[in-house]
Image: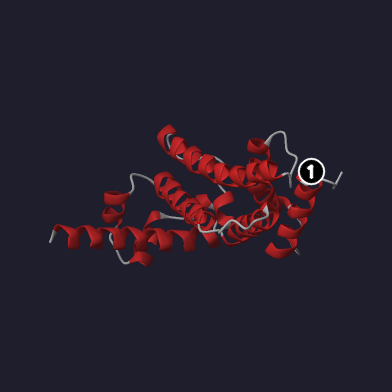
Amino acid sequence: MARTEESKQDLKRAAILRVASGQFSRKPFHEVKLDDIATAAKVGKGTLYLYFQSKDELYTEMVRDGFNELIEQLRQIEPTTKAWPTLKLAVEQVTKWAYENSHFFDMRTVGPATNQSAMRKVRRELGQLIQKIIERGNETGEFHDDMPALTAQFVPAMARSAVVHGPKDLDANATAAHILKVISAAVRKGSR
């Protein structure tokens, strides 16, 4: 019985986050109202506060869940014998995710320090997954990158910058191709 109640709570939380994601994808952060989220999620506003203490926390949890989804996708990438195809797939997935979740980049500061700490943790994990691919390329001699941890941070940063500041006529595929071109020139042997 306790598991069923827990499962219902998880489903309700997920429904609230899904509705919130839709709201934040259509409106800037400051225009999204908790009342609108509660109405669309078919819950009372008080129910929102059972799951999230504030709009900042709701937003942070939504973004963190989104990043965790991306991290899980990257974990599923099967390494090939060559590091470049693996890195290519990772860049494509990060870029596609950035385009599909562009509303995550609208807000600059979120919630209290504990939430920022949680966000740093998922960003660090995302970077570490990409870093491992680059380090494998270094080990096999395919790459020459003296700073794989830094290069790994460039991938999501470039995808984010392209979504926020880049030409609006580019899609995720064109953006990923350009990011790969830039990274290739920097890390692949013989591309200098």
How was the colour assigned to the protein in this rendering? Answer: secondary structure
Q: How many marks?
A: 1
Identified at 25% across, 58% down, the residue is 9
Residue 188, percent across and down?
78, 47
Which quarter of the image is occupied by the C terminus?
top right
Crowding at mark 1 (Cα within 10 Å: few <14, some 14-19, many 20+): some
Direction left: furthest residue? 1
Identified at 73% across, 38% down, the residue is 145
Mark 1 element type: helix
Residues 170 and 127: in front is 127
Identified at 77% across, 56% down, the residue is 178
- The amino acid pointed to by label 1 is Ala
Direction right: furthest residue? 192
Residues 5 and 30: in front is 5
Q: Is residue 132 above or below residue 38?
A: above
Residue 98, percent across and down?
60, 56
Find disc 1 in the rendering and name its residue: 186
Which quarter of the image is occupied by the N terminus?
bottom left
On screen, residue 7 versus residue 103, left or right, reads: left
On screen, residue 77 versus residue 43, left or right, reads: right
Judge whether residue 171 can be spotted in this image. Answer: no
Residues 7 and 188: in front is 188
Residue 76, percent across and down?
51, 58
Residues 140 and 192: in front is 140
Judge whether residue 55 can be spotted in this image. Answer: yes
Q: Is residue 132 above or below residue 113?
A: below
